[in-house]
Amino acid sequence: MKALEGIRVLDFTRVLAGPFCTMMLADLGAEVIKVERPVTGDDSRHFGPFVGEESAYFMSINRNKKSMTLNLKDPLAVDIVKRMIKNIDVVVENFRPGVMEKLGLGYEVLKEINPRLIYASSSGFGHTGPYSQLPAYDLILQGMGGIMSITGPDKDHPTKVGSSIADIFAGTFCAIGILAALRHRDRTGEGQEVDVSMLDSQVSILENAISRYFIKGDVPVPIGNRHPSIAPFATFHTTDGFINIAVGNDAIWKRFCDLVGRPELAEDSRFDTNDSRNANWEDLQPLLQEIMSKNSTEGWLERLRKVGVPCGPINNIEQLVNDPQVLSRGMIVEVEHPVAGKVKMPGCPIKLSGTPADHYESAPVLGADVESVLKEYAGASRQEIEELKQKGVV
């Protein structure tokens, strides 16, 4: 048994935020039916890198799903969806608000067919508000959502986060919303609409930046890798690279000073408390950098970890995917694709003791499950399926 076994998801999403959400549901055991355009499919099928003609980008966020094709602009396709909805628990879509309504497949229509339906939307700005109809991509939302204004080396170089976190967090929060709605349905039998926006998601992850603004009146700016209120909590050069050190309290600070042979720093009134270290960071940083430049990254990691000082390397991707902790947790998995062969990708980060998400099927070839899905969920006969194919509906 999987945690979400028996939950049936009709997935109208494409590219990243929505597919990431439905992949999380699929990893946890939900049956996810991905609905794609005939011939071309999800846009991300055409994003590199490629293994032969198959997109590794697409494969990495669409595993454990089935694929069917539907031309949603055709009334016959809309009728098929409505027939399927009776047998579906969750609909997920990430179109611009209003698109599903124009197709005749909005929540108000579908809930009349299935009042238990959970209808989840993941969009740039949500289904309400003055920006709801604006187009949205990750870069745009990282900028508008504030994260770029506090990321980077200094105030003159706002920097996007290296992965598409506006999409990823929207997909993650959408999955959480769906699970909450399913729990509510378990108690009441009632479905509901879940509305998650990329902008809302970005606001929610700003952590103490918003608190600092409201409490101090300061507008936070990028300060590189150091923490705005904890010190030392920063990156330092070593003889062969970099190391991150996070001294979270005064007891750790004292252990650190003793280890590096500078116990007097812990007694210095400029550095004896976290507040004083923060206030005098400009004095402290060069002292620490001089100390850390006298040993290698690995040398410091071994010494600091022995006395319980939180520290870590800055892994590149090659180092990360070969890290023994990452591998021991099953976070790099190999999946057999029917066309591309064996493909490695990140595993599921949610570890459940009783219903583990430890089985992975490859992302589907476009339209691979059209016939089986139409038979099971829409009650279509073989003759009807052939007619739909001839008309270009599927």
Image: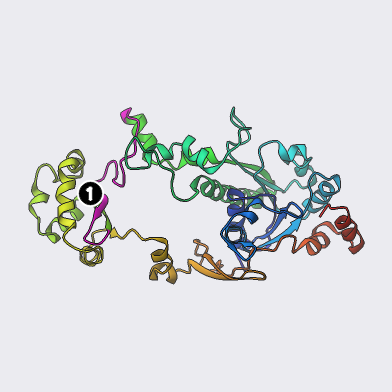
Q: How is the image coloured?
A: rainbow
For the point 72% across and 48% down, the residue is 116
Seen as rendered, the residue at the extreme front is: 52
Q: Which amino acid does label 1 sit on?
A: Pro
Q: Tell me where residue 286 appears, x and y as whole percent.
A: 16, 47
Q: Badge 1, how many Cα within 10 Å: few under 14, some, many 20+? A: many
Q: Which of 371 and 248 is in front in this view?
A: 371
Hey, which quadrant is residue 66 in on the image?
bottom right
Residue 149's place in the image compared with 265, above or below, is above
* Above or below, 351 relative to 217: below
Q: Where is residue 56 in the image (x, y as percent from the top left)?
A: 58, 61
Q: Is residue 56 left or right of residue 252?
A: right
Where does the image place residue 151, in percent across and percent down from the top left? 38, 42
Q: Is residue 48 above or below residue 284?
A: below
Give the magenta range. Answer: 216-241
Magenta stretch containing residue 127, yes or no?
Answer: no
Residue at 34 percent across and 39 percent down: it is: 222
Q: What residue occupies the far right of the structure in this picture?
A: 383
Task: Decide if residue 391 is in sight here.
Answer: yes
Quarter where residue 238 is shown:
bottom left
Location of mark 1 (residue): 232
Q: Is mark 1 on a helix, strand or loop?
A: loop
Name the dominant secondary structure of the magenta segment.
loop
Q: In which quarter of the image is the N terminus?
A: bottom right
Asked whether residue 222 is drawn in magenta, I would say yes
Q: Which of 40 and 117 is in front in this view?
A: 40
Residue 216 appears left or right of 358: left
On the question of residue 28 being in view, the answer is no
